[in-house]
Image: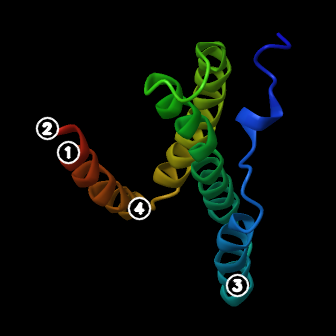
Amino acid sequence: MKEYLKKQIALPQDHGSWVFIFSPLLIGIFAGKHFTYATFNLIIAAMSAFMIRQPMTVIVKTISGRRPKTDLPAARFWLLIYGSIAALALLGLILEGFTYILYLAIPGDLSLRGICGW
């Protein structure tokens, strides 16, 4: 289990990026003046999407040969954890009636199609 719990794979290493997730999130929460179950799900989904960047970066670097192959199992583990948390939070938002949040997947899908050549 220790091989999966590598801090450098689980947590983003860039220090300044945390302000880019917390600032708009906190400003929006306080401007909305109401903390609901949907707000909680939005926070969890946003943090999971932010946290998933680090294991994805490690996976890409490992596949390209810039990191050792021994990092791949831990990166996959954290990708699965953060992805599952984000999916559950998204499901909570959908069940609360916020289906329009799925429109945010369109730019991601289009960029993946461009990168992967789909």
Disc 4 crowd rating (10 Å Cα; few below 14, some 14-19, many 20+) is: few
The image shows residue 103 at horizontal and vertical percentages of: 31, 61
Q: Report the mark closest to the observer, 3 or 1.
A: 1
Tag 2 near tag 1, CB within 8 Å: yes
Q: In this view, does 111 lie to the left or right of 26?
A: left
Disc 1 crowd rating (10 Å Cα; few below 14, some 14-19, many 20+) is: few
The three-letter amino acid code for the residue at tag 4 is Ile
Question: Which residue lies at the image location 73% right of the left edge and 86% below the top edge?
Answer: 33
Distance between mark 1 and mark 4 Cα atoms: 20 Å
Q: In this view, does 96 lie above or below 78?
A: below
Which residue matches tag 4? 101
Which residue matches tag 2? 118
Q: Is residue 27 left or right of residue 63?
A: right
Distance between mark 2 and mark 3 Cα atoms: 37 Å
Which numbered disc, 3 or 1, marks the residue that appears first in the sequence? 3
Q: In this view, does 92 lie to the left or right of 71?
A: left
Which residue matches tag 3? 27
Which numbered disc, 2 or 1, marks the residue that appears first in the sequence? 1
Q: Is residue 47 above or below residue 9?
A: below
**Residue in the foreground of this view, choosing between 22 and 45:** 22
Distance between mark 3 and mark 1 Cα atoms: 33 Å
Which quadrant is the N terminus positioned in?
top right
Q: Which mark is residue 113?
A: 1
The image shows residue 9 at horizontal and vertical percentages of: 71, 33
Question: Which residue lies at the image location 36% right of the left edge and 64% below the top edge?
Answer: 100
Is the image coloured rainbow, by chain, by secondary structure, or in one colour?
rainbow
Distance between mark 4 and mark 2 Cα atoms: 24 Å
**Residue in the foreground of this view, choosing between 50 and 42:** 50
Which numbered disc, 4 or 2, marks the residue that appears first in the sequence? 4
Disc 3 crowd rating (10 Å Cα; few below 14, some 14-19, many 20+) is: few
